[in-house]
Amino acid sequence: MSRPLSALPGGTLVFVDANIFVYGLLRESAECAEFIERCRKEKVAGVTTNEVIGDVCHRLMVKEALDSGLISRPAAAALKGKHDAIRGMRTYGELTARLLRWNLAILPSHAPGTTPPKASESGTGY
């Protein structure tokens, strides 16, 4: 059984995956937004990877394109050939830049030990 992110004790080192960032940045989850704020204020130590940041950026781009009517389905393939319109989008880049300014440890691509344990393996329930 998983526990809420707010139950993480202060000072905990925690791997942050793309869903937490996307739901928090888009304010689709108050729990994720509050957790990100705890990471930003270094109340918990958030760690992520370059791959996760890239995934977040991509997902934010697709969401912005969908919301603006540029694409009709949430799929990367729907963006193909729409280079000029993509260059005109701003929100996904601003949100990604905001994420990069937070107090997070961003591990390099394919760094040893960057694969987070499954909740059932870590014993934390998160």
Image (cartoon, rainbow, N blue to C red):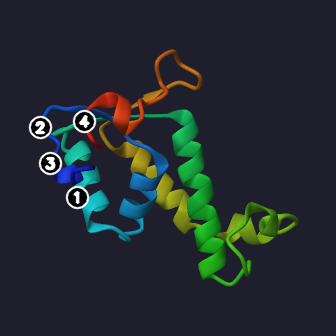
Q: Amino acid at mark 2?
A: Gly
Q: Is residue 65 above or below residue 93?
A: below
Query: Badge 4 is on which residue?
Result: 124
Q: Tag 2's secondary structure? A: loop
Q: Is residue 42 left or right of residue 115?
A: left
Residue type of the residue flagged with mark 4: Thr
Mark 3 or mark 1, which is nearer the start of the sequence? Answer: 3
Q: Name the front one of labels 4 and 1.
A: 4
Quadrant (top left, top right, bottom left, bottom right) of the C terminus:
top left
Amino acid type at mark 1? Glu
How many angstroms separate mark 3 from mark 2 (CA)? 9 Å
Q: CA distance from mark 4 to mark 2?
A: 14 Å
- Distance between the alpha carbons at the discs numbered 4 and 3: 10 Å
Cα gap from disc 1 to disc 3, whole angstroms: 12 Å
Horizontal arrangement in the rendering, residue 38 relative to residue 112 (left or right)? left
Residue closest to the eye, 10 or 107? 10
Mark 2, residue position: 10
Measure how far apart labels 1 and 2 are at the Cα level. Answer: 13 Å
Label 4 secondary element: loop
- Residue at 38% x, 71% y: name it: 28
Residue 57, image x, y percentages: 57, 53
Tag 2: Cα neighbours inside 10 Å, few (<14), some, or many (≥20)? few
Instruction: Answer whether labels 4 and 3 touch (C-beta < 8 Å).
Output: no
> Is 113 placed left or right of 57 in the picture?
left
